[in-house]
Amino acid sequence: MSLRHALLGLLSDRPSSGYDLMKLFDTTLANVWRATQSQVYGELTRMTDAGLVDVSAEGPRGRKEYSLRPEGRAELQRWLTTPAQPQPLRSEWMLRVFFLGLLPSAQAREQLARIAEEEDEQIAELEKLLGSREWTGDRLSVSGRLVLEYGLRGSAMKREWARWALDQIPAGREP
Amino acid sequence: MSLRHALLGLLSDRPSSGYDLMKLFDTTLANVWRATQSQVYGELTRMTDAGLVDVSAEGPRGRKEYSLRPEGRAELQRWLTTPAQPQPLRSEWMLRVFFLGLLPSAQAREQLARIAEEEDEQIAELEKLLGSREWTGDRLSVSGRLVLEYGLRGSAMKREWARWALDQIPAGREP
DNA sequence: AGAAACATGTAAGGTGTTACATGATTCG
DNA sequence: CGAATCATGTAACACCTTACATGTTTCT
């Protein structure tokens, strides 16, 4: 039920509308937790029914601004201090790697080379993001920086791994 | 629809029953793609209806052994050579990190320290796995080794990151 | 004889995706 | 005035989890 906790976390910073929250998912949480518009609106309704948030203001175009209720704040704290239990792991790209041996080695190498290239791009993007903003301010900024750093290290690791993997698969010979 | 492709990949090695496949998910694919019993049996039925596999033999206790049909083999090849499109990212632990600033720094540091410890354990486990088996044999063994190496590097990276993150959060002062 | 392992299946409920549907307000 | 942005919602379908339900065969 982490969508709910993501929403609680964002609302703990400031009251927001569904539309605002959607944009936050697309920007600040893009590399952490994705959500679609229809999910956000639906979950806000359910959270209202559950007494975690309420509509604290209404604006033009039917805008509804949601605020945390004490129950919501308590639930957020509870979640943050409860150890996460290991998530069910599902990685499509790793599954492809696992079955790479079913391809001729030239094609397998192609796939690995593409992974390395994609990580080059990803690193460039994250570095742009790192340079685009001050990272010394408020609370969310500090932990935003932690997440960004993890992304950078993760991409670098994946790129190096892909290069190492290329060395494990002999070039120029059929499987 | 990667569960389907995981099943196709496993069946490309040898014909297997749902029960066999379940065990393979729990062992060889445990760090790549998890699946539950009820998913496996259900998907096998759907794949049979779709003409990708068929029941090639029946055994004791109602055992049904499934084999790839040419259509299934073709679908597997198609999938392996189609570039993966980026997966919707959802990481609960990163979400928690993102909201770490909502905790007093002592508690935030606790969480990070626990992450580092968990990765220590994970690395020990993966190294045990690395030592437990010959990694020079058939195709699945080669790519299994690639996946394992990725796990090791990923855990090491995460551990180092957690230690770095600890340095970013001042100890001993309230937020 | 009893336990462990083998073996398959169904049902209810939660979560997520995509597409559809509608309209108001602001800005140039 | 037209386009972009703001703003919310529903419906169908796909996928996953958990629990229930049942029975056979092998091993000690």
Image: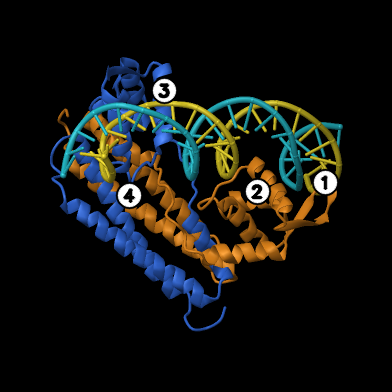
Chain colours: A orange, B blue, C yellow, D cyan
Quarter of the image where one finds residue B33:
top left
Label 4 sits on residue: A159
- Please, which residue is most extreme toward the bottom here? B172
Mark 4 and mark 2 lie on one chain; the one further toward the N terminus is 2
Spatial CA distance of label 3 from label 1 is 47 Å
Q: Are marks 2 and 3 on the same chain?
A: no
Label 3 sits on residue: B45
Spatial CA distance of label 4 from label 3 is 38 Å
Horizontally, residue A78 falls left or right of residue D15, namely right
Task: Look at label 4 and name its amino acid.
Answer: Arg
Q: Which residue: 49% across, 84% down?
A: B172
Q: Which residue: 69% across, 48% down?
A: A46
Query: Mark 3 belongs to which subunit?
Result: B
Mark 3: which secondary structure?
helix
Task: Look at label 1 and name its amino acid.
Answer: Gly
Label 1 sits on residue: A62
On screen, A109 above or below A140? above
Mark 1 and mark 4 lie on one chain; the one further toward the N terminus is 1
Label 2 sits on residue: A22
Task: Look at label 2 and name its amino acid.
Answer: Met
Spatial CA distance of label 2 from label 3 is 38 Å
Query: Mark 1 belongs to which subunit?
Result: A
